[in-house]
Amino acid sequence: GESVGLHLPTLSVQEGDNSIINCAYSNSASDYFIWYKQESGKGPQFIIDIRSNMDKRQGQRVTVLLNKTVKHLSLQIAATQPGDSAVYFCAENTGSNYKLTFGKGTLLTVNP
Amino acid sequence: GAVVSQHPSRVICKSGTSVKIECRSLDFQATTMFWYRQFPKKSLMLMATSNEGSKATYEQGVEKDKFLINHASLTLSTLTVTSAHPEDSSFYICSARITGVGYGYTFGSGTRLTVV
């Protein structure tokens, strides 16, 4: 089975609100995590990543939080915009073979 | 930088025929390429990992003879779906590992395969 999963399959927010997308992982050996955005009919687009020696990393309007104690990862999007509507995947890598394991995905819908 | 160009974006083929999907790294050398399959409203499932100049490593349950992967150069990897059947219809995506600075992977734009 998949080692990375998501709590919420769908998330609907109002434009301008903050969004939080969650992800649980089961492999305690994973040391690198990535969030991807995928629009319909396209390949995944990198959003932000974090290594296991960190618990927080910020980018432009996005923040990733990593809680290794409970093996939980989250993506926070500030001031969500309609263009943020997409499916978001978390992915993990154990570092030994560079393979990524993807979570189930969360569909984010931003209402104007 | 670090762009992977994937072609074709869409292909329709008849049952029993073969289809080749190409992924080219445009501005870097891709020593490792990953091939994924994605069904509608589902996640990406890794099919195989290819390293330039060597045989691909397939994930459990993926038929090697059906999904032929060739990584003959540092800029080109191909996936050939042989004797395609309707159940092979899916979205196929390649990804290259990027070495050095920056994030570790870049993805192609995907190929929508429909077998009729």
Image: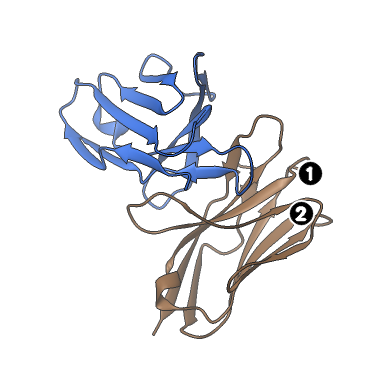
Chain colours: A brown, B blue
Q: Is residue B6 above or below residue A109?
A: above
Residue at 47 percent across and 48 percent down: it is: B1
The answer to which image quadrant residue B76 occupies is: top left
Secondary structure at numbered mark 2: loop
- For label 2, the crowd category at 10 Å Cα-Cα, with few meaning under 14, some 14 to 19 and many 20 or more, is some
Residue A71 badge: 2
User: What x and y, as percent, mark residue A74?
Assistant: 66, 64
Q: Amino acid at mark 1?
A: Ser
Of mark 1 and mark 2, the one earlier in the sequence is 1
Q: Nearer the viewer, residue B101 or A47?
A: B101
Q: Nearer the viewer, residue B40 or A94?
A: A94
The CA span between labels 1 and 2 is: 7 Å
Residue at 32 percent across and 23 percent down: it is: B80
Q: Amino acid at mark 2?
A: Lys
Q: Are marks 1 and 2 in contact (CB under 8 Å)?
A: yes
User: What x and y, as percent, mark residue B20?
Assistant: 28, 26
The answer to which image quadrant residue A17 occupies is: bottom right
Residue A107 badge: none
Q: Tag 2, which chain?
A: A
Residue under pointer 1: A28
A37 displayed left or right of A50: left
